Image: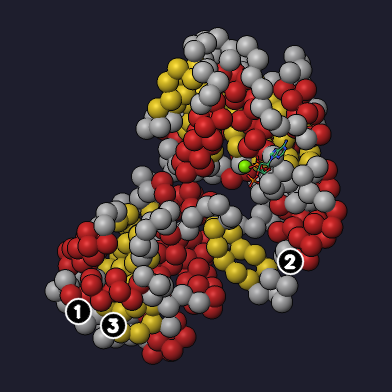
Amino acid sequence: MKINFNINLTRKQKEAYDIMHDKETQFLIARWSRQCGKTVFAEIMMIEYLCKSNSFNAYISPTFAQGKKVFAELVALLETTGIIKKANAQDLKIESIYGATLKFFSMESPISIRGNTVSGLLVMDEAAFFPSQLPDGSDPYYNVIFPIIKARKPKVLVISTPNGRQGMYYDLYLKAYNKTSGYRELTASIYDDDLIKKEEIEELKKGYPPLAFQQEFEVQFLDNALTVFPNFQNCFDGKFEKGKCWIGVDPSSVGEDNTIVSIINADKQVKQYKIDGTLDMKYAKIAKIINEYKPVATYIENNSIGEVMANEIKKQLINKSNFYTFTTTNETKKQYISLLAVAIANNEIHFEQDNTLLYSELATFTFKLTKTGNITYAAKEGYHDDTVTSLGICMQCKEDFKLSGTPNVDFMITSGYRMVI
Ligand SMILES: Nc1ncnc2c1ncn2[C@@H]1O[C@H](COP(=O)(O)OP(=O)(O)OP(=O)(O)O)[C@@H](O)[C@H]1O
Ligand SMILES: [Mg+2]
C-alpha cells in the first residue's frame, strides 16, 4: 500500500526515519527543539505501523489532552485513505484494515498502560515531561513502560525537548549518548531546523528568557530544570479528612480551562473538585461544596468571569460573610506559588493519590525569567494550570485567615483580595 502525503520530511526527520529503520536500533532518543516537527514525525511513524499487520502500537504523552489531539490529527489525516477500520474517540484507539492497533495513553493514567504488550511501535512524546515518580512512589519506566515492551521488543521512539538533568528521558538519552547497544540519539537544535529562518531565530531569541531559550531551542539539559515544584510526587500520599478548612476557586466559563475548587484543611491535606456543566450548574455545585465544608474562608479568583460567578454563588451560600474575591496579578501569583512550593519542598502538604490532574499540572508548571529579571509563572505552553492556581489561591486564603476568621491585615493589603459586596 502506498499513501501519499503532501509533505517533505525535514533533514532531521529524514535522519530519524533512517534510524528508526536501522535493524540494530530499538530505541531512538530524539532531543529536538520546540516546534520543529517532533509530533509530525511521530505521526508518520505511527501511520507506517498502522500498515503493518497485527501489530499493537502505543503513543504515550504526559497529558490526556495531548493524546486526544494527536488522535484527532491522525484520524483526520487518514480519513480518505481507507486504512482505518475503526477509530474510537472514547478509548482513543485506531484499528487499521491490516489488523494493526494504535492506542493512546497518558501519564495522567499510568494504570491503564499496565498490562498491554506493544509489538510494533511505542512512541513517548514530550517524554522529558513524564513524571519521574508515580503517585504510589514507583518508577514510571521500570514499572509501567518497561513491562509493555519487554516481551516483544518493539521500536521505541522517545521524543522531546529537554527538561533538566533528571528523569526517564534524561536517563534514556544518556544510555544512547554512551552508545549502549540498541540505543541511538538524534539531536536537533533550532539551528538545525529547516522550518525556521536565521532572522526568525534572532527575533525569537530577543524575546525569550535566556534560560528558557537554552532549554527549549538550543536543547540543552540544564542543571536545574525550569521546574517550580521539584519532587512534588512525594506529596501524593494523602487522604482528606473533613474539619477546619479553607477553600480556593479558580473559575472558568467555557472552553478548555477547568473550574477547580480546592479545599485545604489544618493538616494541609488537599481535596480538589473539577466542576463541570452549564454556568448555573457550576454556581450551584460550588455553593453546595462551600455550604457542605463550612470553610473558615473562601477565595474566588476574580478574573473576567470571576466577579459574576462570585455574585451568583454568594446568593446560594448559607454563610456569606467569609466569601472573598481574589485578584491574581504577577505579584500575588508569585506569593501563592511560593507558599505552595515551600509546602511541597518541605513535604508538608498532602494530595490524594488519585488526583491525576493536579499531578500532571504540577509536572508541567514552569517559570520564565523576563528580560528585566522578573519571574512569571505559568503552565508550559500547551498545558493547563487550573488545579495549581486554584490550589495556590486556596493556600493564600489559608495563610491570610490563619487565625480563624480574622484576616491577617498585612496580607490583606498585599494579597489583593476584597470582600464580595
Ligand atoms: N516536514 C515538515 N514540513 C512542513 N511543515 C512541518 C513538517 N513537520 C512539521 N511541520 C509543521 O511544523 C509545525 C510544528 O510541528 P510539530 O507539532 O510536529 O512540532 P513539535 O516539535 O512536536 O512541536 P512542540 O514542541 O510544540 O510539541 C506544525 O505546524 C507542523 O505542521
Ligand atoms: Mg509536539
- 386 displayed left or right of 341: left
Q: Is residue 262 above or below residue 15?
A: below
Ligand 1 within 8 Å of the CB at mark 2: no
342 versus 60 height, above or below: below
Q: Position of residue 376 (x, y in %)?
A: 60, 69
Q: Amino acid at mark 3?
A: Val
x then y, percent, for residue 390:
40, 64
Residue type at the position of mark 2: Gly
Does any portion of residue 147 appear in the rendered image? no
Residue at point 74%, 58% (across, down): 213
- Give the quarter of the image for residue 93: top left
- Kindly identify which residue carries mark 1: 320
Q: Quadrant of residue 50?
A: top right
C-alpha gap between disc 3 and disc 1: 9 Å
Placement of the N terminus among the 4 image quadrants: top right
Q: Residue at x 51, y 40 (%)?
A: 69
Q: Residue at x 55, y 63 (%)?
A: 378
Q: Residue furthest left?
A: 318
